[in-house]
Amino acid sequence: MTTWSAFLDGVRIAHGPFPALAAALRAHPAWAPDPPWFVFEDETGRQVELDLHGAGPEGVGGGTAGAGGEGTQGEGAEARRPGRPKLGVTAREVTLLPRHWAWLERQPSGASAALRRLVEGAMRADAGPARARQLREAAGRFMSAIAGDLPGYEEASRALYAGNLVRLEAETAAWPPDVQAHVLRLASAAAEAVRDAPTARSSS
């Protein structure tokens, strides 16, 4: 479930899915037509503008995006073709060197199945590092928007992308506690994703 966090003067005043966040902000003493708070999507760290009188955050993709898009239609069309496995597969051009094609043609399950296995294996192997990158980028966006003028920002940013949690905590010690806690929460989750990556690969 997508969640958002709202900050006012460095204090997190609301957190949660949009309905709960909107209710908390409307009830806050600082509520105004042009509110002074900062609202961030937790998963991406992007700052969003909230339309509290409408359906939700402006500029954030809704759950129906792509439901009738080209990719989905293409997959459905491919799945309905005779002889295609009902996996939602899509036929597209792949460019490989001759030795790659020669290796694929020797695979007992066929070239397509071999390619799918290779891609799935690469996706599993990259799951931890990719998640870590996503969380670090979310923390970096959040820091840039709300803490860019705070002391130690440059060094904190370097520590974040280096994965140095000890230095990151030290460089953000003078920041508002809620801002520091949010950054450290994302950075710690990124470090955990990296630690869990070998386990995920070995169990696959």
Image (cartoon, helix red, strand yellow):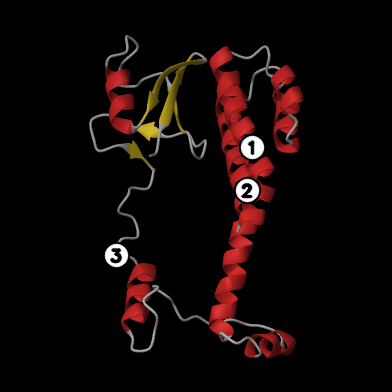
- Toward the viewer: 109 or 57? 109
- Of tags 2 and 3, the one toward the viewer is 2
Which residue is pictured at 68% across the width and 18% down the height?
Answer: 172
Q: Quadrant of the N terminus?
A: top left
Q: Earlier in the sequence, mark 1 or mark 3?
A: 3
Q: Mark 1 belongs to which amino acid?
A: Glu
Q: Pinpoint residue 100: horizontal percent, then vertical percent.
A: 70, 84
Given the current orientation, which residue lies at the most extreme front position? 203
Determine the CA span between mark 2 and mark 3: 30 Å
Residue 146 vs 71, above or below: the answer is above
Count of labels in the image? 3
Which residue is labeled 3 in the image?
Answer: 68
* Mark 2 lies on residue: 128
- As drawn, 204 above or below 177: below
Q: Is residue 112 above or below residue 65?
A: below
Q: Which residue is mark 1?
A: 192
Q: Is residue 51 visible?
A: no
Task: Locate residue 83, reporting x and y percent.
Answer: 38, 88
Q: Nearer the viewer, residue 103 or 67?
A: 103
Q: Identify the image quadrant of the C terminus.
A: bottom right
| Residue drawn at the location 73% of the way across and 35% of the way down | 163
**Front one among 198 and 189:** 198
Which residue occupies 35% across, 68% down? 72
State which quadrant residue 184 falls in: top right
Q: How many residues crowd mark 1 within 10 Å: few (<14), some (14–19), many (20+)?
A: some
Kindly state the secondary structure of the residue where label 1 is placed: helix
Secondary-structure class at tag 3: loop
Q: Amino acid at mark 2?
A: Gly
